[in-house]
Image: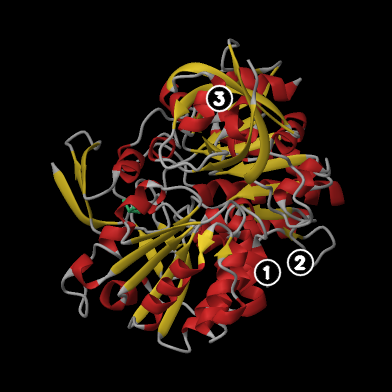
Amino acid sequence: MGGVRVILISGRTLEQGTNLENKLSDEYMNATAVCELSERELEKLGLKGDGTERVRVRTSAGEIVVAAKKGEGYPEGVAFIPMGPWANAVVNGNTKGSGMPFFKGIEAEIEPTDDEIPSIYDLMRRYKE
Amino acid sequence: MAVYTDVLCPFCGCICDDIVVEVGEDGKITKVKGACAIGRSKIMGHDRMESPAIREDGELRDCSYDEAIKRAAEILADARRPLLYGWSSTVCETDRAGVELAVEIGAIIDNTASVCHGPSILAIQDVGLPSCTLGQIRNRADIVIYWGSNPVFAHPNHMKRYSYLSKGRFTPGGKKDRKMVVVDVRETKSAKLADLFVKVRPGGDFLVFSALRAILRGHEDVVPDEVAGVEKKDLLSLAEMIKNANFIITFFGMGVTHSGARHNNIANAIEFTRAAHLHTKATIMPMRGHYNVNGFNQVCTWLLGYPFSIDLSQGYPWYNPGETGAVDVLVHGECDAALIISSDPASHFPADAVRHLARIPVIQIDPYPNPTTEFADVVIPSAICGVEAEGSVYRMDSVPLRVRKIVDSKFMADEEIIRRILEEVRAIKEKEGE
Ligand code: SF4
């Protein structure tokens, strides 16, 4: 199955905020290890977007597996991951001299996958290697 | 049972000050009223870091405050280019102590503004900020614009307490007396509530601000039929709304600071506000995230002359975000130790920055464990400011407020932790100097 190219943005959600100081919890993972996609993109990927399927998101900075969910109000070609460690796994650290990384407007490729979503501990372990 | 009224919420830049907190006989908080879901969860508290700890052979071992503070001081005194980062979810008194520590050890000191409203600060330094207080907005604003900001999620009580849904002196009808406009790249929950939603192509905000400026300054002829996905007729009707308003406020969020032209976006947003001034009263304000992110910027500006991303390694403050920002010094592999206070860069920094953080000694001061704890070498639990410790904070509109201590705690307050580390560092240096 082929992938789709999107512009990726990250940002806040209510669930992400409520669990902001509870980041090692399952609630935080369920709230932030997700990629919200428009209906058009889900269709192209052959996914339902009910949160049970997973996608691999790839950018110039790296790749990450997260749950795929239908998001409301997205224009075609825009995908969203709540801010947090899963989103930042694919954010580039080059601030282009501004001090601020590009957390939004990232070119990304998304494809369906059967791989597991890494837990927060797996993610941090990766950084230690 | 004790009931505390008019409690201030120490979570987001709204610092709602009408919260009611009930405390049971055992000194534990039993109920929080008036706060939003995020604020309630913060004040109620949950799984804390129970003890100071030091990492040995890869595992965290519990220890005393004395031992953890001593180890932290050794790490910092040893470091050649230490980074002191966080400072936004604590009080100004802690930030002041942090600046003293930074000066003492020649550190880079930076707060979460550098990944949030840093670009806004750069723009404000360039072109100023025609702003006001949230009280003025509550009493006067008849047009409320949220641009690249989703208050329903990020600042849930903002609309109810200060803007669209609040009732004020000249806006007694609440939302009947106001119009709300949301500009965003997607139809957010906030956008659904708005009287007018303007959908911009990602990264297109700069162009839309420019087009509005042109229209407000009487040059609509230069505006093309479509600007970054927005039809000219919609821009004209928004400009018309603005011209006919009594008092406009534009709240802008990370949708504008994180994308496209960043600080240039904000400078243009401020110039748009100035153009609106030709017709009516117009103001603009950043939607600051952490409750005291602004406070750190204020404290650093009084003490060092610059608001964030300050390098003190040369013996005087040097400010050049992009070179001296926390993300930059981590991505460039420059710093060799980090103290992280009330923040979680492991979650909120890009992968490249986290990778370096995982390689260097890290001291963490926080009430809660978080992903940064996973590679912290020294962990120092702290009291929650605004619940277990008091202090001064600055709301998003730069109004200083005092957050209170509601319950007792066995944990040390942030300021004391920093001051004790500072004392230890001085003692080590004195010994070395002998
Ligand atoms: S809006 Fe912000 S300050 Fe107000 S209760 Fe919610 S989290 Fe606290």
C-alpha separation, residue under disc 1 versus residue under disc 2: 8 Å
Q: Secondary structure at mark 1?
A: loop
Asked if the beta carbon under badge 3 is closer than 8 A to the nearest atom of ligand 1, the reply is no
Task: Name which residue lies at 56% across and 22% down.
Answer: A45
Q: Is residue B206 visible?
A: yes
Which residue is at the front of the view, A102 or B176?
B176
**Subunit ID for the residue under disc 3:** A
**Subunit ID for the residue under disc 1:** B
C-alpha separation, residue under disc 2 versus residue under disc 3: 53 Å
Marking on residue B306: 1
Using a 10 Å C-alpha cutoff, classify the residue at mark 2 as few (fewer than 14 neighbours), some (14 to 19) or many (20 or more). Answer: some
Which residue is at the front of the view, B144 or B380?
B144
Q: Residue furthest left?
A: B1
Using a 10 Å C-alpha cutoff, classify the residue at mark 1 as few (fewer than 14 neighbours), some (14 to 19) or many (20 or more). Answer: some
C-alpha separation, residue under disc 3 versus residue under disc 1: 49 Å
Q: Secondary structure at mark 3?
A: helix
| Residue kind at label 2, given as amino acid type | Pro
Q: Are marks 2 and 3 in contact (CB under 8 Å)?
A: no
Residue mark closest to the camera, 2 vs 3: 3
Labels 1 and 2 in the same subunit = yes
The mark that comes first in sequence, 1 or 2, is 1
Which residue is at the front of the view, B272 or A126?
B272
| Residue kind at label 3, given as amino acid type | Lys
Task: Name which residue lies at 58% across and 81% down.
Answer: B221
Using a 10 Å C-alpha cutoff, classify the residue at mark 3 as few (fewer than 14 neighbours), some (14 to 19) or many (20 or more). Answer: few
Residue that numbered label 2 is attached to = B317
Give the image location of residue B11, x and y in percent.
Answer: 40, 49
Residue mark closest to the camera, 1 vs 2: 1
Q: Classify residue A112 as left or right of residue B165.
A: right
Residue that numbered label 3 is attached to = A44
Q: Secondary structure at mark 2?
A: loop
